[in-house]
Image (cartoon, grey):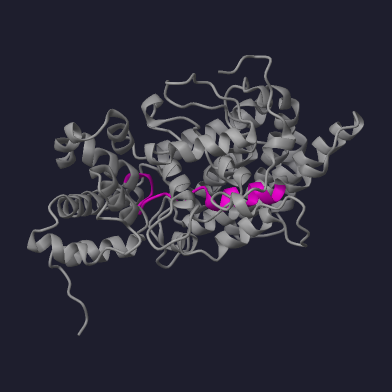
Amino acid sequence: MTDSKQKMIWAKLINDKRFGLEDYHDPKKNSTRTDFRRDYDRLVFSSPFRRLQNKTQVFPLPGSIFVHNRLTHSLEVSCVGKSMADSIAQALKTRYAAIGEPTEHFDHLGDIVAAACLAHDLGNPPFGHSGEKAISTFFSEGPGKEIQSMLSPEEWSDLTRFEGNANAFRVLTHQFRGRRRGGFAMTYSMLASIVKYPYESILSTKGKFGFFTSEKADFERVASELGMLRLSADGEPLRYVRHPLVYIVEAADDICYEVMDLEDAHKLRILPLATVVEALLAFFSPERRAHIEQSMLRVSDPNEQVAYLRSCVVGALVDRCAETFIANEDSILEGTFEGSLLQNIPDRERSAYENCNVLSWNKIYCAAEVVDVELAGNRIISFLMERLVEAVMNPTLNYSRLLLAKFPEQYDVESPTLFGKLQAVLDHISGMTDVYALDLYRKLNGMSLPAV
């Protein structure tokens, strides 16, 4: 249990020990490529990361107009997060050098955050947030409700509040069948940096949490090693203070999805040029705004004008968030900082960001194109959940045997526990791309057959 006098220490928070490979850790190894950089490279070359190219961000996957998918979003978040982290690292090095404290660990902040940003969406199922909702409501409202009595309260809470963030931690740490111990074997600091909600699902009030019951001990090991402040006593549901770098990853993600959604909405003609321009110019002082408007006159292509404005806004928000982090470093390390970085930036930028958020909810997320994806995604995921859950619970039935034969070998449908079997279903479905889920849905409904 923590108190207000405790404080996290950067020298412990930045740790290149690899999850699952602790016995091979050599803190004195000499290499031109750090373990944090290896995290980034390992993610880029991984199958789960590649599959993000065929997962919906907000709008339908591209037809004649290319919009963001989960892959391009993650790459952009990584760029923004690294820029913010590098700026913060430079300021922290100056601050700590002035009082004679070591500063070399701050050199790694950019690489840690860049990798965490790449990984932050790895656990998201197909069809965006509607996929998450379809999985959770299958248990809370659908056929899966009958299973409740067979599970512990903690397991049931995990299923009815299924969360992509918690699933990302599982994807990175779980030893799937035939795979190595430690999953991706990522560094402790990188793993902690993706956990936005460092507590169990049973403590969640808005459906957000950081790890499933199956990974509870794993997260506790990581958090303890890094010196993250624990908020729960022994015997209570597990809860920690956030790792400080989570605030940077979160801000980069929020900046990108908000600003890029406006840009995509303009390209798809959901929002007119004037509306997007006015929303983005609101981030700047009158003097800066006049300069930007003058610069926009140099190009006549509306898409280029919006792209230029977008870059200006992203740059401004990166600077303000970095300044906010530095100004609140003590409260962040003490676990007393309230809200996100974006909620604590200066009034002008915060108000403009909030107005963009309102605009997105009123005009973008309720647009026909977006709602159509949500409706279709909900139907597809719900159907697959029903069929696959039925198969793992009744594996001897003929249809079940045929369906289970299609399961990738890495997912343990023969788990000795019901919760383990259900997690195998969730592992399989959440790892699907939109196209694969749609194709499987059609085949199971007899709507398409393999080409002969």
What is the magenta range?
A: 110-130
Q: Is residue 284 visible?
A: no
Left or right: 299 in relation to 151: right
Residue 24 x, y percent position in the rendering: 63, 55
Q: Identify the residue at horizontal 24%, vertical 66% (top origin).
A: 406
Q: Is the stretch drawn in magenta largely helix, strand or loop?
A: helix
Residue 60 x, y percent position in the rendering: 38, 57
Q: Is residue 163 above or below residue 152?
A: below
Which quadrant, please, contains the N terminus? top right
Q: Is residue 448 above or below residue 232?
A: below
Residue 204 x, y percent position in the rendering: 40, 27
Q: Identify the residue at horizontal 18%, vertical 67% (top origin).
A: 443
Q: Identify the residue at horizontal 40%, vertical 61% (top origin).
A: 61
Quadrant in which residue 30 is drawn: bottom right
Left or right: 397 in relation to 309: left
Residue 219 x, y percent position in the rendering: 50, 38
